[in-house]
Amino acid sequence: MKTNCTTTVSQTVRWILLSASLGSAVAAHAQSSASEELTEVIVTAQKREQDLQSVPISIQVLTSEKLDELQARNFADYVQFLPSVSFTNGSQGIPGNRSIVFRGIATDGGLIASGTLPTVGSYLDEQPITSISGAVDIHLYDVARVEALAGPQGTLFGASSQAGTLRIITNKPDASQFSASYDLEVNKILLGGPGGSFEGYVNVPLVADKIALRAVGWYNHTGGYINNVFRARRFPSSGITQTNTALLGNDLNDTDVYGLRAQLGIDLDDNWTVTPSVIAQRTTWDGSFRSDDTKAGELNVAHYFPEFGRDSWYQAGLTVTGKVADFDIVYAGYYMDRKRADQVDYSDYGFYYDAIAGSGTGVVDNLGAMIDPSQLNTNNIEFDKMSHELRVASPEDRRVRGIAGLFFQSQTELGENNYLTPGFATRLSVPGRPGQVWLTKQERIDRDRAIFGQLDFDLTDKWTATAGVRAYEFDNTLVGFYGVNTTYFGTGVRQCLGPRAGVGPYGVGAAVVPGTPCTNLGVLNSDGSISPKRSKGSGTTWRLTGTYKFDEDHLIYATVSTGFRPGGINRAGAATPFDADKLTNYEIGTKNSFLNRRATLNLTVFQGDWKDVQVTYQAPGGSGVAQITNAGGARARGVEADFALRTGAGFTWSGAVTYVDAKLTAPLFTGSPIPSAPNGQRLPLTPKFKASLVGRYEFAFRNSQAHAQLAASYTGDRNPVLVTRDLTKTGVLPSYLTLDASLGGEKGNSTLEFYVRNLTDERGQQSRGAECNINYCGPSTFDPVGQVYRIYIQPRTIGLRFGQKF
């Protein structure tokens, strides 16, 4: 039976009080009152190696040890312990399709075709892994740490770091010695299928103290927990009854992830190191990740088409580090190639549009007879990205020290979005594509370049002033086709650009993008040629920080910083481009170590003013094409805090908490004189309150080092969408609290751990949404409940993990 939130909170409070009492009692009877210091954490948040407690930035870090202790292997595992970070994986919940949010700076999931760029930058070491389609979800193994940098990082990290930056730092090749490890895991979702993983790495010196290879490999299978159950429904116009008997099954949404990462470290001399690297990962999945609670029951759906997908990508690069005189030089160049393909059920669209608008009368075969109007949706994305950065840093021990650099990147996405009805009349289909009701196939190219610099000046031995600036330019283009044949709406081939001949009453023009019937998104030039639509802009972001160090253990800082996100082109040809939006951030923070560095406490108070906010909306009726516009403004205020405490006798506590009040500061208008959302409307996706707490006890047991741990994570309620009309149909995502428990030990070079994730089997909801325009597929007079799906966190999972290090 599922435990309710009140009971779970009560259990957690009792556990905290009991553990605290036990820890105090044991510590009081310990032979020594002294205990070890907390481990110093080195970060590169300012592109220099620095102690975490001396960096004047709000930053939360999960070290390699902490990631292992939390059994964190992917984004969903570790983000629950980063309270400054929220995310959504869209209304479908398919793997790797996530949008990351810092401090409430979001208006939507950003997951539509040719949508807005992310507001959060993601990095693997020096490699920017933020893409037009969002960041890739890298499997974590042999990772040094994860850094979550809250607030605009536009000076050092650029365009998509408007609200924050998430960085994964890997362990590097070591030419001084051989090392290796492997880990084996088996697990079972108690309401679902089995899972398991194999992971390993090897570090091999090839030339003593000069060249080393570090290679990492992984395979992970996650069991499914969503069932496809029987449903029959009758279409009003045709009287055809639809059933899904052939697709019934349990635990269908299983996932496989396998990949390889390799780095070659080459020390050319005492000053220069060259590190070529490659990482490749493939994720495949089956089934639906949605739950149709109201119609099919919790963790069930009733879908009529097979659902599956894959996400394959690799990134190759070269990092060169060295010195010229006393100056540090870094060059980082990378190329990424990513291909995504999926097929999902879209049959709700045919059912609800037929029931409400009678659209089923127009869905006929080649003989003119009405057919089942259900649709399936397939998506294919081909993405590549190239980036280069060159920077120079002056010596760190100087009173005045600086970093300066150049950056360039270009990313291209060829996206194809298909809506298919088997048997649909050829004459009504998108030309050249029998059975295709709708096609979007467009090529998008985003280019940006920048010059940046940051200067630190120690005014005294206690006061430091920091100033940074980044001058940028962006140039984004989009060209291709969207829409249907001439019969429906005002989209598709009736809007073709260029010379037309030969197909239907409207003809078909030139096709710039291969595989399309023509081009209706672009610019027709006077000579008859077609150019992409273009959005260009330039500007600066900047940062000013004042830091005062009371002593080596205590500092306070104040920052004013800005961030931006480039503008772009709407995929609907008639819609106007949208402009860049900008965030101005004000924050005051303090970092403190106590008890001979056995305790830390960091606190930040912030306010972010967001202007020209990019908002995605979907007007009722019509073609339902989502569009992006610039709204007035929004504001996010809040507090972030984190702490760590080693109490003695083997007890360690750590935790973090974030409170965010993010809302509109002006009414939202989306093509109508009536506001779509009022002034003061809460921004979506981010809870007002999010917190985590981890208690760990380490002790000697039969000549081994053992441990017991309990980790709690609380996520407050969230709005899944911004527009008020849509919010009344989706409802609010409720708050939830999860507990993870583990018990294990280490002896020699071997470790063994038993764990339970989501101990109380909480049904935490990550997102909600309908298959189609929620004004049709959501609650209506035809169906007061509608077809609104929920995306849940993984149910209670029990596992056993064994590993060895060499």
Image (tube, rainbow, N blue to C red):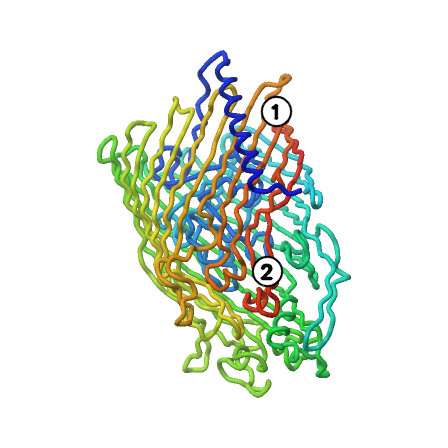
Q: Name the foreground residue: 281 vs 728.
A: 728
Task: Looking at the image, tell me whether mark 1 or mark 2 is earlier in sequence order.
Answer: 1
Secondary element under disc 2, as helix, strand or loop, is loop
Q: Name the foreground residue: 704 vs 382.
A: 704
Residue 746, numbered circle: 1
Query: In the displayed structure, does residue 356 sit left or right of residue 242?
Result: left
For badge 2, the amino acid type reads Val
Residue underneath mark 2 = 788
Residue 206 visible (yes or no): no
Query: In the displayed structure, does residue 206 sit left or right of residue 580?
Result: right
Residue 157, compared with residue 294, is above or below; it is above
For badge 1, the amino acid type reads Glu
Residue lying at 57% horizontally and 47% vertically, measured from the top left: 764
Density class for disc 1 (Cα within 10 Å; few <14, some 14-19, many ≥20) is some
Q: How far separated are the C-alphas under marks 1 and 2?
A: 47 Å
Quadrant in which the C terminus is drawn: top right
Q: Where's residue 104, x and y in %?
A: 43, 51
Q: Where's residue 594, x and y in %?
A: 38, 25
Q: Where's residue 579, x and y in %?
A: 37, 64
Residue lying at 27% horizontally and 34% vertically, measured from the top left: 548
Q: Residue furthest bottom?
A: 505
Residue 773 visible (yes or no): yes
Q: Residue furthest right?
A: 246
